[in-house]
Image: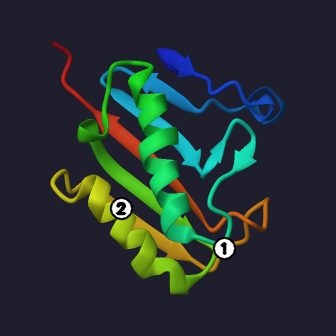
Amino acid sequence: MAADRLISSGSPYESAIGYSRATVCGEYVHVSGSTATVEGVLQHEGDSYGQAKIAIEVVIAAALAQVGYTLNDVVRTRVYLANVEDMDAVSKAHGEAFGDIRPAATMLAGLKFINPGMLVEIEADAWRRAE
């Protein structure tokens, strides 16, 4: 079954790889893995906290906003870390964004990213009842 709507960030990788920044399926929005890459440039190299903040507050929030959703609608996140030592810094950024929302969450560490400067990647699922 195809998604109701595909959300694009304009990245050339979306068509090359065959994915969307996010998909809308009924009342759900599924946001693909998001890094601190803004307009093709990795932000906060070497700073996992800064990268997590950008991934959440800029990249994920922008994808959700395209369909009228906000971070308050997030019900699940998946956080991927290159280094387990970054858990506390990334957890802090996650908590600042989602502390009152408290979505279901998963965090994995010890992963290699395509860009070795990337320290964190975050996926998000949002849900809101149709009005």
For the C terminus, which image quadrant? Answer: top left
* Type of amino acid at the residue the image marks with label 2: His
User: Where is 42 relative to 12, above or below?
Assistant: below
Residue of label 2: 94
Whole-percent x and y of residue 108? Answer: 51, 73
Residue 113 figure quarter: bottom right
Q: Three-letter amino acid code at disc 1?
A: Leu
The residue located at (20%, 57%) in the rendering is 102
Residue 117's x, y, as percent?
74, 66
Q: Where does label 1 land, which residue?
A: 111
Secondary structure of residue under mark 2: helix
Q: Nearer the viewer, residue 125 or 87?
A: 87
Q: CA distance from mark 2 to mark 1?
A: 19 Å
Splitting the image into 4 quarters, where does residue 74 fall? top left
Which badge, 2 or 1, comes first in the chain's sequence? 2
Name the residue: 57% across, 47% down.
Answer: 34
Secondary structure of the residue carrying numbered label 1: loop
Residue 45 visible (yes or no): yes
Is residue 54 placed above or below 38 in the rendered structure? below
Image x and y of residue 24, in percent? 44, 23
| Residue 46 spot, x, y in % from top left | 66, 72
